[in-house]
Structures are given as structure tokens and as C-alpha cells.
Amino acid sequence: MGTQQQQVSLPEPRRAPHNSPARVRVCVRLRPGVGSGEGQDAPCVRGLDSRSLEIVNWRNQMETMKYQFDAFYGDVATQHDIYTGSVQPILRHLLEGQNASVLAYGPTGAGKTHTMLGSPEQPGVIPRAMCDVLKMSRDAVGSDWDVSISMSYLEIYQEKVLDLLEPSLQDLPIREDRNHHILVPGLTERELVSFMDFERHFLPASRNRTVASTRLNQRSSRSHTVLLVWMHQTQRCPPHAHRAAKLCLIDLAGSEDNRRTGNRGLRLKESGAINTSLFVLGKVVDALNQGLPRVPYRDSKLTRLLQDSLGGSAHSIVITNVAPEQRFYFDTLTTLNFAARSKQIVNKPFTHESLPGMERSWEPGHLGSLGVVGGVGASGLEQRGWARRVLASNHPPPREPRSPGFQPPPIPNNPGVLASLPSLGCNDAHVSPVQITSKEEKEEAGILLIEKKKRGPKRKVSQGGWGQWTWWGPHLLPHLCFSQGPASHENQAPPEWQLAVRPDLLAQSLKNILALLNDGSAKELTALHRIGRKKAQLIVAWRELHGPFGKVEELQNVEGISAKQVASFISVRRGQQACIHLPNGQGAGISEAGITRVMDPCRSSPAQTWDSDTRMSSSVEPPRAQTRSARRHRSWGQAAGQSRARLPRAVHLWEACFPGLPGDSDRPISPLSVWHFPCWAKPMGWGGLTTEPSLWGSRHRMSEHLLPGHLPPGR
Ligand SMILES: Nc1ncnc2c1ncn2[C@@H]1O[C@H](COP(=O)(O)OP(=O)(O)OP(=O)(O)O)[C@@H](O)[C@H]1O
């Protein structure tokens, strides 16, 4: 065969045959089932053909929902099938100077790392793609083009960009140049000539990835890892055009349902960061699908880095990993929904090519450019420290003619490839739970301490009929009852009566709230305490992603809703009490939460009798040196004044507790009246007042409604 025939026919410069829009391709891979195959381990999803699958409809078990993708790989599909079927075809675009991206997406434990990295016996996408890319560069020797390959490897851990090749570099910035190329200034870049080079850099770097053991995966990725591979081509003859293409191989961390992962402390914090960034990823996909003018790429580091892969200039494939077991049902469902939305995204790939002398798109030193290289010629490469090796000298290439539609030959499913993979810990046979380092332990301890501080001192819960969990609002209104029984809180003098929540009714109430959380629209959710429009939308989004809430407390898994806030939903809340003083000198606070606290107003510090660990408590504590009158002004009045915004709910509650008092349907009570109650109780010797002079006038008018018959039973 003559030399001419052996020339590799790379695409001609500036002829860009594939500059047309390209839809993001989406394939789904089903992990083989684990467990007994029965009950929670029973499969809930199955393939129909090479492109479609069906999953049971949770609303009606007799129905299934069907999904169609670019490809479906069942549980018997091999790594080789996935690679040759979906990944390899897009690699040829690198030679055309176009970017390509492969993303593995899915819930935790569904097989993303297995797909991307694999094991020595079953090498995944990364080693196979690297084999092919390096082979492409070898094949280019003797052609008109010099080809060089380099790589960077980073992880996004808790919203920090960490360089895996150079772990000492902490939280690298992400920048965008004026050509909208995303850059990571300072990111380490290693030149690769052979697969051995790749292993030399990649294997130690992989050990720097953050992995940890969770209940669902013994080696769970705690970060999103991104392997960046650049292919630079420079024309040997004039006009010395330069082409640069980037291959992104992304192993996303899996979305996590912390009900099942059992995450706490550091793991929970990591999980929060993972779920948040995946949530933003979903928002990006939605914005792209809806053609919104603003795509929220900047809302997380992950989406900022993926800007090119989704809605950008890359040929992208999303490999969606799902698990078949019933217990992963909602994870699978939300993952499939995400995948279905992703396949509508259309990218606009183009050839990144420049001539010498054209403007460079980055400043020297910004070696970690994730963006396309615009205007770097051969000299540019040298300036960047890239030895432009003649690859042929090291690797005499097999000279084969190559068509413009060249596709690299598939690499064999060769166990020898990446023989050192066990050291990555990705060989199932060698799986062992990840040991937590002392640094992690310290961090974990720190986080737990902060969480503990946030939770505050443990509240004493009295034994005698005080509900431990309460909820505000109409859901609870019918659930209040008066019961006899001693209160054990030391600050609560045993009352003759106390307000309590009947446990059965409370359970029913929580059930109602749960139903609202699971079925309510965003608008309906705003009826919940401290849930505004935005948080309601987040709840809906979380529900879509993770399925229904199992318990009200799981609300804290929703982004933007803290554990503290959830605790405030389901425990007595301060600042929303209407208070009454009882003739025996004691008083009761009645709140939207439906719980009253009996207190003794004669104590020097009524605040402490309300709730010793609240901010409100300290603010209502009366200064001892002041007169009795001033003290009362400060205490009850302040509490009332601070909480007026919440009053309507208290009114409902009030009416439920004291039927017949002002507020009955024929005489609607104004919210302020409730707060005025201590005031109008005063003429009857019950004490209490308000600092609102505007309310004083109504005192007597209202007091006429207070009749002994209106007092709670047991009084
Ligand atoms: N197709 C498959 N064939 C055989 N084993 C698989 C397959 N997919 C996944 N596994 C096994 O399932 C387990 C979990 O897979 P893997 O760690 O890849 O999940 P993951 O989605 O990356 O999870 P995380 O998001 O927590 O990192 C591993 O032991 C892996 O070897």
C-alpha cells in the first residue's frame, strides 16, 4: 500500500460538515437486579425493545408508563454494548474540532460509576474512550495534522471545584471569557501520549475522588467528577489552522433519598450539595426545553461547567442509569422523567478552528480552559508548555487509510485494559467500605456539633397530655381537646386543666398535612406555615424528583427548608400565642400550633415559663427593676406586637377552642381581638395588657363577651 493511500484523511480545515444542530442523545441503562427479587427487591421496570421500556404506574398498579429513548440497554447489556452503541459514534466529532460530552446520570447505586469507569474485567466508558482518542492521535501521524491529547480531572465537591491531578489546589474559580467559553483558571493539565500516560495520571487522581460508604452504596461518589480530554490539531502546512475539541466524561454523583441512605452529618451535608446541584441541573434542562431567555447555569458549579454539554456546542449523550428494584421506584421514575426531558435539548455543535494570529480566547496561565480554543496555533501550544511530540516516534502507527466518516475501531472487551483498576476500588470483588479519614472524622464531628447547637438544648416534654408534635392551622383545629392531667414541666405549675392534643387526632392531622405535601399544588402548599411561593415550588420540585414524602419531617430534605424550620412546623411555635390568664393566677398560651403552655404570670420571668429556648422568650422577659405595669407592657404586649402577622390562624384556633366567644360566624372577630384578649380580661381581674393604645378602646366592648360559661371545661 502506497504512502499516499496510508494518509489519514482528517477533515479539511474550515470545512465543517456537521455544524448542524444536534439533539442531546439519551440512553437508559438498567442495572442488573440485586436481592431476592421479591417484595421491595421485585423489579418494577422492564425493557420493551432496544429503545423503550415501561415502568409500573404508582397511581394504578394495573397500568404501566412507557418511555422511549435513543437506546435502551437492559440488565444483560455489556460495557462494550453501551460504548459501541452510544458513546463511540460521537467521538469522531473530536477530529472535526467539535466538542463531545458523555454524562452518567441517575440515583445513587444505579451504576453510573460502573458505566463510566467499570472494572478491570469490564472497563467502562472512560478507559475505552481514552483508548480510542489516543488511537486517533496515533493514527494522525504522517497526516497533515499534528494531534496532541491532554487531560484534566476535577471534582465538584460541596460546590467546590477541586483539581484531582493536583489535590493541593483548592476550590478553583470558574470563569467565562468574552466568547462565552467556560474556563477553570489554574486547572492542571497533563499531556498524554499513550494509554500508559493516561493510567499514570488518572489512577492516582482517581484515588483523590471523594467516595464514602452509604447504606445504598458501599462506594458512593460524594462528588461529581469531570474528566476533560482535549484534542488539539494543528495543520502542518499553511495556513497552519488549529482545531481544538474537548471531550467531557462526567460521572455525576447520584441523587440521594436520605430516608434510605441513612446519611447524617458530613454525609448529609454532601448529599444536600449533590441534590441541590442536580436540582439545578433539572432547572437548566427545563429552561432549555421551554426556551427561556435565562438558563440558570450559574446557580450551581456543576451546571456552570456543563454549560457546553447542555444547550451548548457539544455533541452530548446522557447515559441514564436506573435500578430495577421496587424500592428504588420513585428514584427510577424521576430519573426517567429527567431523561425524557433531556432528550428534547438541542445543542449547536460547531467546529472550533482558528488561524494563527487570531485572537486568543484566554490569557496565558489559564491552562484549564474548558472552553474552545480560539486562535492558538502551533506556537501557542508551545507557549502553553505542550511538547508537540511526534507521536509516531514513540508509537509507530499502523498506517491505514481512513475515510472522512472515520470511526475508530471498537476496542475489545479486554480484561487487560486498565489492569490496575482495582486500585481505584471499582472492582466489585474488591469492594470494601470506605474508611473515613481522621480529617473527615474531624469535619464530621464539627458538623454534628453545629447541628446540635442549631437544635439547641433538648426541650423537656411533659408527660401529661402535651403533644410532642403539633402543627398549626386548620388541619389541627378539630383536634384540640381539653384533658385533665398533671404537667411535668418544672416551669408549668400543675394546672387544673390543660389544653392537649389528642394523639389520634394529631396523627390524623399529620396525615392530612402529609397528603397536602404530596398532592397539593404549589399554590395550595403556600397555606402551610412559613411556606411561600418559592418554597412551595421547591417542595413540588423535590416531590417530582424523589417521589412523595414519607413523613412530614422529610420536608427538611427540600432545598431551602432547614431542619430548624421543619422543627418549628411540628413543635410549639413562639410568637403566635394568644394568652389567657386564669383566675387562679395561672395563664395559658394558645398558639396556632394548637398547644398551650400553662404559665404563672406572677413569676418574675414569664418568658421562661413560655419557652425557655426561644428568641421570643428572651425578648419578652420583663426587666425586674421596672414597675409591674411596665413589665406587663413589655412582656405580653411585645409578644402580641411581634406576631400580629400570624394572627388569622390563631383566630381560627381560638374560635375552635372557645366557641361562643367573639369570633363566631355571626360576629367575626378581628385578629387583633385575640391579642387584645388579655386586655379585655383585665376588668375581670385576669391581668394582661397590650402596648397598643389603639386597642385599648375596644377593651370594654370586648369584655362583655367574656362570660364564665365560655371558659374551658374543667375550669
Ligand atoms: N451493569 C452493571 N453490572 C454489574 N454490576 C453493576 C452494574 N451497574 C452497577 N453495578 C454494581 O452496582 C453497585 C453500585 O454501582 P455504582 O457505584 O456504579 O453506582 P453509582 O450510580 O455510581 O452510585 P453513586 O451515585 O452512589 O456513586 C456497584 O457494586 C457496581 O459494581
Image: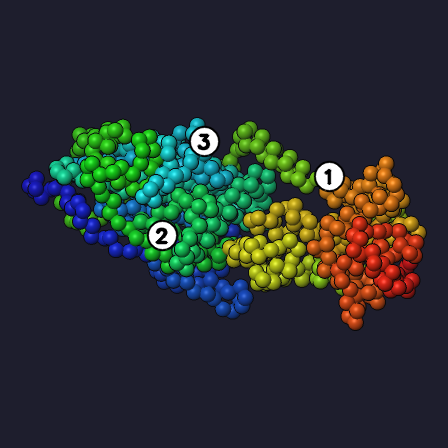
* 54 is higher (above) or lower (below) than 256: below
How far apart marks 2 and 3 lie (CA) works out to 29 Å
Residue type pointed to by label 2: Gly
Q: Does the residue at mark 1 contact the one at mark 3 (Cβ under 8 Å)? A: no
Question: Circle 3 is placed at which residue position?
Answer: 170
Q: Secondary structure at mark 1?
A: loop
Question: Circle 1 is placed at which residue position?
Answer: 457
Q: Which of the two discs, 1 and 3, labels the residue nearer the N terminus? A: 3
361 or 261: nearer the viewer: 361
Q: Which of the two discs, 2 and 3, labels the residue nearer the N terminus? A: 3
Residue 171 in percent (x, y) is at 45, 34
Question: Circle 2 is placed at which residue position?
Answer: 311
The residue drawn where x is 57% and y is 50% is 558
Task: Classify mark 3: residues with Cα within 10 Å, few (<14), some (14-19) or many (20+).
Answer: few
Q: Quadrant of the N terminus?
A: top left
Residue type pointed to by label 3: Gln
The residue drawn where x is 62% and y is 55% is 531
Res 470 visible: no
Q: Quadrant of the C terminus?
A: bottom right
How far apart marks 1 and 3 lie (CA) works out to 36 Å
296 or 114: nearer the viewer: 296
